[in-house]
Image: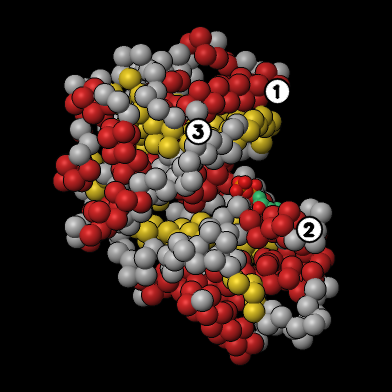
Amino acid sequence: MTYILAIDQGTTSSRAILFDRDMRIRDVAQEEFPQHFPASGHVEHDPADIWNTVLRTSRAVISKAGLGAGDVLAIGITNQRETTLIWDRATGAPIHNAIVWQDRRTAPICEALREAGHEPMVTAKTGLLLDPYFSGTKVRWLLDNVEGARARAEAGELLFGTVDCYLIWKLTGGRVHATDATNAARTLLYDIHKGGWSSTLCDLLDIPADMLPEIRDCAGDFGATEAEIFGEPIPILGVAGDQQAATIGQACFEPGMMKSTYGTGCFALLNTGATPVASQNRLLTTIAYQFGGERCYALEGSIFVAGAVVQWLRDGLKVIASAPESQPLAEAADPSQQVILVPSFTGLGAPYWKPDCRGAIFGLTRNTGPAELARAALESIGFQTRDLLEAMQADWPGGGAQSVLRVDGGMTANDWGMQFLSDIIGAPVDRPEILETTALGAAWLAGMQVGLYPDREAFAGTWSRERRFEPLIAPEVRDARYAAWKRAVQATISA
Ligand code: ADP
């Protein structure tokens, strides 16, 4: 038997997953690592933790399965996006901790650029917004704040990379400094229309272009691992950011296909094919994947609080002991009560973008209890998804967005939540057999290139549904419920 190793380097843990020749999971190894919060709004990872957890889990999963490096045909990498590293070209030593995507320290840089009127140009080129979320202003901050960094960067001594790029550099023993188009598209330095680094954006952010990695296809050649790492060199043949890898793993290859991942937060991507659709509703325009030099675009919307609202029921309200208990509790809710929970604990994401907004509950009565709150919490995921889908429809009218939504992520285990999602969006919700779509996407990119896995069309044919949820409520009930949600959101924003 031969295997593909998927490395999934996430925000709170690193995972290594071995897929067999039938694209089934043979083994998984996972390690959490510390989060550093050095100041309010600052979030950092130690690069050594990122690297060591990847190395240990990758080695562990191979030995756990009783295999050796010779059994692994290729590696695919998927990663937390936007997180920013800078290291020394000669020694590999990072100049600072990685600045994580959640970090808000560059808000003043973004604000200054916005006030100077640069946002329309930045959005036109990158499909993104001037927000601290993306890598570009983090690079700028590091160059301005780490002693000597700017001079070293200008002398060509430093390299920048997102997490994929750093791992490739480490795995290849510093021989390859490359990233893929989906990760490049999150940096604020990449022109999504031209498919390359933008010198205008590098100048605007004062970032020497020499620091930037080469950009390759998602299904590309990223070099081979140093022999001593696993015992033999293994080629790295696939790279995609986590949400894009999930889009690939869900086989959303046709324009109009859409996936939504429900973890702590929720990310929805709509494949718009060769057309980069500019959003009028503050969604992002991004690269879904790049194969054979051809970019496929997507509209992306994110919700900050999805599964996190279930964590709040458990850890904050303590009305459930575990996430799955949210389902029977919601089922027991009094149907005559119309409680609405707007879970903007950390602000509202797309399409509202209200970072300072905080959560609210509407419709409380003397009879409202844990069951009604649990139901309202699960319903808030459906309502927010409908907000994203409406924004996508409005941005791409007549674009052929299909009505079926493919879902994945831990929260999709909740049947009641998935049924409500289907009810409120008024469209089928498809849950696949394989819920590890992110890792599968990365594995497929690599496995397809060595001929172990089927080509794109055949792979799409292997996608199989575990369950479809169809809308069961009457259209007028759906409209009334959604209208009540919209009123609740407006009231929350203006509170
Ligand atoms: P992440 O990758 O962001 O850590 P996961 O995909 O592992 O997220 O999903 C975990 C999230 O899903 C948690 O927020 C948890 O509360 C939620 N979750 C897991 N199982 C259920 C369930 N049966 N019902 C509702 N929520 C669930």
Please tell me whether mark 3 sits on a helix, a strand or a loop.
strand
Left or right: 136 as drawn, with respect to 289: left
User: Which quadrant of the rendered structure holds the N terminus?
Assistant: top right
> Going 55% across and 44% down the picture, which residue do you hit?
438
Where does the image place residue 355, in percent across and percent down from the top left?
A: 45, 62
The CA distance from mark 2 to mark 1 is 39 Å
Mark 2 and 1 residues: CB-CB less than 8 Å, in contact?
A: no
Q: Residues within 10 Å of mark 2 (few under 14, many from 20)?
A: few
Residue 45 is labelled as 3
> Going 33% across and 20% down the picture, which residue do you hit?
88
Left or right: 417 as drawn, with respect to 74: right
- Looking at the image, the residue that sits furthest to the bottom is 476
- Between residue 90 and residue 41, name the one nearer to us: 41
The CA distance from mark 2 to mark 3 is 30 Å
Residue 318 is labelled as 2
- Is 15 situated above or below 102? above
Q: Is residue 238 visible?
A: no
Tell me the quarter of the picture where residue 235 sits: top left
Three-letter residue code for mark 2? Lys
Three-letter residue code for mark 3? His
Where does the image place residue 13, in percent across and percent down from the top left?
A: 60, 35
> Going 69% across and 79% down the picture, which residue do you hit?
339
Q: Residues within 10 Å of mark 3 (few under 14, many from 20)?
A: many
Left or right: 370 as drawn, with respect to 53: right
Three-letter residue code for mark 1? Ala
Residue beneath disc 1: 65
Q: Is residue 110 visible?
A: yes
Mark 2 and 3 residues: CB-CB less than 8 Å, in contact?
A: no
Camera-side mark, 3 or 1: 3
Please tell me whether mark 2 sits on a helix, a strand or a loop.
loop
